[in-house]
Image (tube, helix red, strand yellow):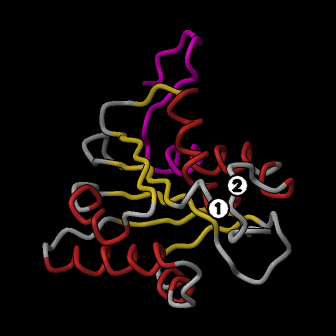
Amino acid sequence: MSKNRQIMILGVGNILFSDEGVGIHVVQALGEEYLFSNNVTIEDGGVLGIRLLGIISQADDLIVVDAIRNGGPPGTLYRLDGDAIPGRIRAKNSLHQVDLLEALTLCQALDKVPETVIIGVEPQDIETIGLEMTAPVQEKLEELKAMALRELDRMGAGYKRKGVESSCV
């Protein structure tokens, strides 16, 4: 892929509800630990849903990081793309996911739908108020970051760990 393509890594979720905030935790960690090429942006989308339309319509490629309720054991990792995305989100796992699908659909009206991949983890608890994630989800943070970086590799984007001398950015 071309380095001219705009790539966004978007974390969504609510950090006030335990595992629901995993996407936010992942993008915050990526932003703290890595430097990215100029065509890559890291965004904390919180629970903005439909209000994300403005920023996601600027991306050519979109990597969404989120908690994904798919019926697996807590901590199961998922990668959804193409036709798998609407089917999984239609299950109404959370309100922000429904709004995210609507925002992606509205991008069609702007004739600017980003190529989208959703990566995530099966949550154990998205209802308890608390800033701490459960152990099965906390244990997957490094793997989720690695999944996001693999997507950047696939897209040909540059990045490097902060404090490491390299020319990959």
Find out whether residue 158 is within the magenta segment: yes
Residue drawn at x 13%, y 73% as measured from the top left: 110
Q: Quadrant of the C terminus?
A: top left
Q: Is residue 113 above or below residue 18?
A: below
Q: Which residue is mark 1?
A: 17
Where residue 149 sits: x, y (%)?
57, 43
Query: What's the magenta region?
Result: 149-169
- Is label 1 in a helix, a strand or a loop? loop
Q: Amino acid at mark 2?
A: Gly
Residue drawn at x 83%, y 69% as measured from the top left: 74
Q: Is residue 156 above or below residue 33?
A: below
Dot 2, how many residues are within 10 Å of its Cα: few (below 14), some (14-19), or many (20+)? Answer: some
| Closer to the camera in the image, 26 or 17 | 17
Where residue 79 sits: x, y (%)?
62, 67
Where residue 160 sits: x, y (%)?
53, 24
The disc at residue 50 is: none
Q: Is residue 68 above or below residue 22?
A: below
Where residue 91 sits: x, y (%)?
57, 90
Q: Quick one: label 2 or label 1, which is nearer the N terminus?
A: 1
| Closer to the camera in the image, 95 or 2 | 95
Cβ–Cβ below 8 Å for labels 2 and 1? yes
Q: Is residue 134 above or below residue 36?
A: below
Q: Does residue 5 appear to the left or right of 110 in the view shown?
A: right
- Is label 2 in a helix, a strand or a loop? loop
Dot 1, how many residues are within 10 Å of its Cα: few (below 14), some (14-19), or many (20+)? Answer: some
The disc at residue 130 is: 2
Residue drawn at x 66%, y 44% as measured from the top left: 146
| Closer to the camera in the image, 161 or 100 | 100
